[in-house]
Image: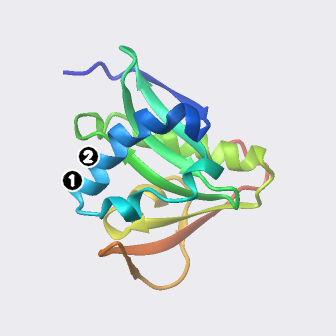
Amino acid sequence: MPSDTFVVRILSWCEARVAARRIREPVFVREQGVPLELELDEWDEQSDHALAISADGRAVGTGRLLPDGHIGRMAVLKDWRGKGAGAALLMTLVEQARKRGHASARLNAQISAAGFYRRYGFYEVGAQFMEAGIAHIAMQRELHSDPG
């Protein structure tokens, strides 16, 4: 059983690539059936990447912030879900978007995860759509200068 302690770090794709892929491939490709060629894209190199790293040094969650303030590729390893890693990753990426001067943070949430994002101030914008064979909804959170 893993310890519930972790830290979240913002890294470049060069620094995060190996660890992020060890999370994203099992979650998106194997669990959810997303084709690998859709999961990895040209935006990785241009994005800031958040990694949740456990006390024993293992990366257990990841997400990214695109240059336009879009948050994506949020994934937490199955045995770490429900332990706060997803929330910590999201809040770290929101803060990074604020530091970069974005007025809002946006994301495309899987419908099953929309409630999670609502708890952190995101709201739906627009209609549901399909992405990689999975139903999604666009969501947004105004950033202003509030601390979290």
Residue linked to disc 1: 30
Work out whether residue 26 or residue 77 is closer to the camera in this orientation and state it.
26
Q: Amino acid at mark 2?
A: Pro
* The C terminus, quarter of image: top right
Residue drawn at x 53%, y 83% as measured from the top left: 126
Neighbour class for label 1 at 10 Å: few (<14), some, many (≥20)? Answer: few
The reply to whether dot 1 and dot 2 touch (C-beta < 8 Å) is yes
Instruction: Give above or below for 75 relative to 36.
Output: above
| 8 displayed left or right of 36 | right
| 95 displayed left or right of 118 | right
Q: Residue 75 in the image: state x and y as whole percent.
A: 38, 47
Observer able to see residue 47: no
| 130 displayed left or right of 27 | right
Residue drawn at x 63%, y 56% as measured from the top left: 66
Secondary structure under tag 2 reads helix
Residue linked to disc 2: 26
Residue drawn at x 69%, y 50% as measured from the top left: 97
Residue drawn at x 34%, y 41% as measured from the top left: 23
Which of the colour schemes (rainbow, by chain, secondary structure, one colour) is used? rainbow
Q: Residue 4 in the image: state x and y as whole percent.
A: 33, 23
Secondary structure under tag 1 reads helix
Neighbour class for label 2 at 10 Å: few (<14), some, many (≥20)? Answer: some
